[in-house]
Amino acid sequence: KLKCRIGPSVLNSDLSQLYAESQKLLDNGADYLHLDVMDGNFVPNLTFGHPVVKCLRKKIPNAFFEAHMMVQNPEQWIEPMNNAGINLYTFHIEPVITDVIRVCRKIKESGMKVGLAIKPGTGIEDLRCYIDHADVILVMTVEPGFGGQKFLQDMMPKVQWLRHNYPLLDIEVDGGVGLNTITACAEAGANMIVSGTAIIDSIDQAAVIASLRETVES
Ligand code: DX5
Ligand code: ZN
C-alpha cells in the first residue's frame, strides 16, 4: 500500500518564529514540511526563498523539506534550493517559458526529487506527457498564492484520474485541506496531504495531524 504523508504548510504560521513553528509541527507528527516559495510574479504574493530555507535546514538537519515553487522561472532556483537543503522541488508547469522536461532533468541531476504542480485551471491533458518525469504530482485545490482559501472540490476528478492511471504515483493535494475536506481527497486517491491553516490555527496540532492521517490511511 502507498505510504500516506502529512506535510503541513508553514505559510500562515508566525514566520518571525519559523524554526520554532516548524519544529513544533514535526514534534506534533508532521511527516515533512511544505515550504511555499512565491516570487510576486507567478503569484501575487511574496514569502521567502533559499536563504531562509538554508537557515531553517541548519536548525533542522533531518526532516524532509518540500519547496513548493510558485515562481515564474523554476530553473533559476534549482541549485540554490538544493544547496539550501531541499529534498523535493515542486514547480508549476504553467509558465510558457518553462521547459518542463529540462527542468525535471536538472532537478534530478542535483539529487532532489521532482514534483510537478498544476493550478486549478490546468487540466490533466496539459500535464499528461510529463508525468513519467516526476516523482510527485501536486494537484492544487485552491488558486495558489494564499493560505486559508476554500477547498475546490472540482479538482477531485483530476486526482481520481491520476490514481486510476498511476496506482503507485505520489499524488499531493494543497489548499483548503482540513478535517472537513480530507475525506474527499483520500477517496480520490491522494496520499500526500498539505494542510496549512487547518493545522496552524488549531489548538491541538497533534490531534488534527493524527486525524488527517487516520482518514487517508483508512
Ligand atoms: C497556497 C499554498 C498552500 C497554502 C495552504 O498558495 O500553496 O500551501 O499555504 O494553506 P491552506 O491549507 O490554509 O489552504
Ligand atoms: Zn503550497
Image (cartoon, rainbow, N blue to C red):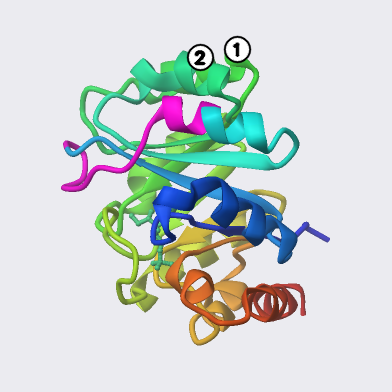
Q: State the extent of the magenta-drawn residues as a range.
A: 41-54
Q: Main secondary structure of the magenta part?
A: loop
Closest to the observer: 88 or 102? 88
Closest to the observer: 157 or 79? 79
Q: Is residue 52 magenta?
A: yes
How far across and down, in percent of the image, does residue 93 sit?
34, 36
Would residue 51 be found to the left or right of residue 7 on screen? Answer: left
**Residue drawn at x 58%, y 30% as measured from the top left:** 86
Q: Residue 197, located in which quarter of the rendered image?
A: bottom left
Q: Dot 2, crowdedness within 10 Å: few (<14), some or many (≥20)?
A: some
Residue 166 in view, yes or no:
no
Residue 59 in view, yes or no:
yes
Dot 1 amino acid type? Glu
| Disc 1/disc 2 C-alpha distance (Å) | 5 Å
Q: Dot 1, crowdedness within 10 Å: few (<14), some or many (≥20)?
A: few
Q: Is mark 1 within 8 Å of ligand 2?
A: no
How far across and down, in percent of the image, does residue 83 sit?
56, 16
Q: Is residue 163 magenta?
A: no
Instruction: Note whether 154 is above or below 78 in the view shown.
Output: below
Dot 2 amino acid type? Lys
Question: Which mark is on residue 109?
Answer: 1
Question: Which mark is on residue 106?
Answer: 2
Could you say whether the residue bearing mark 1 is in a helix, strand or loop? helix
Quadrant where the C terminus is found in the figure: bottom right
**Residue drawn at x 26%, y 53% as measured from the top left:** 145
Quadrant where the N terminus is found in the figure: bottom right
